[in-house]
Structures are given as C-alpha cells and as structure tokens.
Image (cartoon, grey):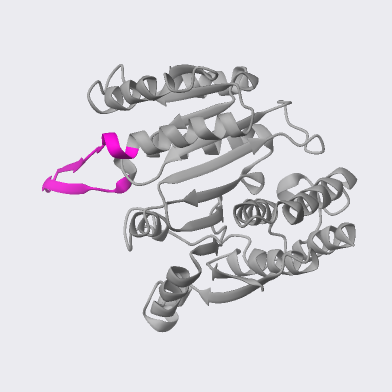
Amino acid sequence: MKQTITVFKGDGIGPEITDAVLEILDAAKADLDYEIFNVGEAEYEAHGALIPDDAFTSFEKTRVLLKSPITTPVGKGFRSLNVMMRKKYDLYANIRPARSNAAIKTPFENVDIVIFRENTEDLYAGVEEMIDKDTAHSIKIITRACSERIIRDAFEYAVKQGRKTVTCVHKANIMKLSDGLFRDIFYEISKEYPQIEANDKIVDNTAMQMVMNPQQFDVIVTENLYGDIISDLSSGLIGGLGLLPSSNLGKDFAMFEAVHGSAPDIAGKGIANPTAFLWSACMMLDHLGKQEVAARIRRAVDAVLADGNCLTPDLGGHGTTAAYKDAIIAKLA
C-alpha cells in the first residue's frame, strides 16, 4: 500500500522544484501518492487564502508534508507561513544538516555539522508590541519544556548516529536569564549522556569559529533565531543554500522543506537548483522508513554533482533545472 503525503507548491521557484523532485521520487520508485496544493502569496491573490482549508485537512490526515518555498513579505504584510505552520502543528525540532560534497569546491573541506534548532519560541516566535509610535518591543520567550525536548533530541541523535560532540550555542553572557536557562538545561541533560562530549559557545564566537575551523563542530543545539542564522552560515561553508535541506519534526506531524527562499528573481527561468528540496525529500523518506530509496537518490545526486555537466548557475554551471533532474533520473536507472 502506497504512503500518501501532502505536498505544498509555494511561490517563486517553488512549483518548478516541486515538479522536478516529485518526478525524481517517482523514478526512484519511492511508492508515494501525493495530495498537492498551491499555497502562498500567489494562492492568496488568486483565491483569497494563503493556505486552502483542504490543504490543512490533508496534512492533518497524512501527517507528512513536503513543502516548497513560500514568499514572506519583509517588514509588512502577512506573517511567515513557515512560522505559522511550525507553531500550529508544534513542529518544534528543526534539523538542518550541512555536509561538504567533494564535487562542490569551497574553501572548506570535510564539513559535517547537524544543527538542531528549537522551532517554536524565542524572538523568532514574533511576539511583538508597539509601546508607542517610536518604540517597538519584541519579546524573547525561553521555557524549560521547549528547551528540554530539543536538547534531548540533539543528544539522542548524537547517540544513534555515532556522533561525538553536542555544542550548545547561546548568548548567556548578556541574556543571563533566558539564554542562561537554555544553557543550564543543556548541562543538566548532558549528564544523562556521558558518552557524548558536551560544550557550549557564545553565538558570535560560534559564527567566527565556523568560518575558521568548521570541522570542530559536530552536532549543534540552539535557540530559534540563532539556529536560523548559523544554519544559513553553514550553507555558505558547503556551497550555498541550494544544498541545505531541513526537517521540522513534532510529536505528531513532520514537515520537510529546503532552507532557501522562493527566489522570485529567477522564477520561471528554468535554472532553479532543486538539490536542497530533493535532499529534504530524502530526509522525509528516512522518516517514512524508506532509507534504501533515500540512499539511492543521494548516490545519484552525488554522481551528477561529480560529473559537473548539468550544474545550475548557483553551483557555477550553466545547466537547467530540467537537465539536472533528467541527469539524476538517468543515474537512478
């Protein structure tokens, strides 16, 4: 019996990379059925809803969502749909693996960092108020319950994947109560995992260390805003956002998406890089117990990247989305 998943086609390059990834999944015999919905800014302009009710209903039934990028207005307009989805379905664990690929040349080699980002609170939750017309407050919220579960997930992952170190990233030297609580909980939980080395770094030092000696990092666990920033930094170490996948996991629901945005400047040009979205789909396959299919797709992508003939412009090539997708399918065959 086929597994049914929900698929959101977003804005910008979203529809293009979605079509490419679904074709690759079918070629790999992932044995999936799709309930596909248009969401985002374009859907709102056409039908008056950012996400149709039927799309929510589908996700609540399948509990697995493959979501392409959605445009978020800057400084005005509707709130981020990504943030809304994470909070609505308590998708508290945002996991972003950044791993070097020998075919993509950067100044950094052998980068292999997995970032666990708390996904539901902190400044990124967007709790704001205007005190007066010239003063705005943004409220930072850190709780024991949310901190404990993301930190424990990071240690559990380290144990299961044979990792050696978990690093807590914070700014407890300044935010002694909120970030101090997160750091204290980290060391409390670390005592339950004596086989894993536990250390901590201030977030600004982390940023410097990541571009001086990224190989020192193994698993990182951090708060919402810091996790967003340093995971983008990690993508720069491995060749760009087009190579960084992610999962958003909760107790009952799972959402998989590329870290990059909707890239409206290249939408419709046929040159979007679907790799991050495809690797996010591979994380979804792992979640669904289809590890062998995920491994075959990853090997096919590695082979195409190594050939270098169909690389998209963001990776230094002149290939199209279609040519890159076809090359991956040919490797699968």
User: Foreground residue, 111 or 13?
Assistant: 111
Q: Is residue 235 left or right of residue 105?
A: left
Which part of the image, by quadrant, shows the N terminus?
A: bottom right
Query: Is residue 202 visible in the rendered structure shown here?
Result: no
Q: Image quarter for residue 101? A: top right
Query: Is residue 55 visible in the rendered structure shown here?
Result: yes
The x and y percentages for residue 119 are 40, 45
The x and y percentages for residue 193 are 48, 22
The residue range painted magenta reads: 125-146
Residue 79 lies in magenta, yes or no? Answer: no
User: Foreground residue, 324 or 298?
Assistant: 298
Most distant residue in the bottom direction? 47
The x and y percentages for residue 282 are 67, 53
Q: Is residue 118 above or below residue 45?
A: above
Residue 144 lies in magenta, yes or no? Answer: yes
- Seen at 30% across and 40% down, the residue is 123
User: Foreground residue, 143 or 325?
Assistant: 143
The x and y percentages for residue 273 are 70, 55
Q: Is residue 302 left or right of residue 128?
A: right
Q: Is residue 330 left or right of residue 189?
A: right
Most distant residue in the left direction? 132
Which part of the image, by quadrant, shows the C terminus?
A: bottom right
- Seen at 59% across and 23% down, the residue is 211
